[in-house]
Amino acid sequence: MNADKGLTKENLFLYILLAVVIAGLIWTVYGFFKQPYTNTQYQEALNSENAQDICATPAGYTDQEWKEHMSHHPDRYAKCLGGN
C-alpha cells in the first residue's frame, strides 16, 4: 500500500484542471447575469452622433477612440473609413 506522498504531478494536474473548471464556471455565471447592452443605451449612443456628419467625433470621445469605434462598425461608417 502506497503512503500519501503529498503533492504529486498527477494531483497537481488535477488541482489545476479543477481551478480552470471553477474559473470557467464563474465566468459563465457572471456573463449570464450581466446586464446586456439595452436599446435605450443604443439610442443614447446614436443621439450623441452629429446628425449632419456621422464621421465627426462626438462629445466624450477622442478622435482616436472614435476612429477605433467606427472601425468596429464598417457597414455603418464605410464612408468615414474610406469606403464607398
Image: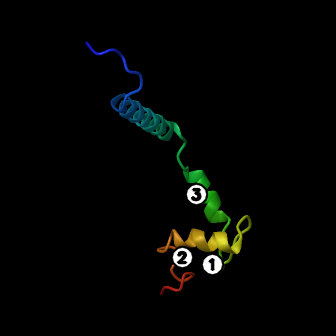
3D distance between C-alphas at marks 2 and 3: 16 Å
Task: Identify residue type, mark 1.
Answer: Cys
Picture residue at 36% right of the left edge, 31% below the top: 14
Task: Identify residue type, mark 2.
Answer: Tyr
Looking at the rendered image, the quarter that the N terminus falls into is top left
Task: Identify residue type, mark 3.
Answer: Tyr
Q: Position of residue 18 (x, y in %)?
A: 40, 31
Report the side of 37 relative to 57 (left or right).
left
3D distance between C-alphas at marks 1 and 2: 7 Å
The reply to whether discs 1 and 2 touch (Cβ–Cβ < 8 Å) is: yes
- The quadrant where residue 77 appears: bottom right
Picture residue at 73% right of the left edge, 64% below the top: 60
Q: Residue furthest right?
A: 59
- Kindly state the secondary structure of the residue where label 3 is placed: helix
- The quadrant where residue 42 appears: bottom right
- Kindly state the secondary structure of the residue where label 1 is placed: loop
**Residue picked out by circle 3:** 42
Give whichever of discs 3 and 1 has the lower sequence position.
Answer: 3
The one nearer the camera, 24 or 82, is: 24
Q: Residues within 10 Å of mark 1 (few under 14, many from 20)?
A: some
Picture residue at 28% right of the left edge, 16% below the top: 2
The reply to whether discs 2 and 3 touch (Cβ–Cβ < 8 Å) is: no
Report the side of 75 relative to 61 (left or right).
left
**Residue picked out by circle 1:** 55
- Kindly state the secondary structure of the residue where label 2 is placed: loop
3D distance between C-alphas at marks 3 and 1: 17 Å
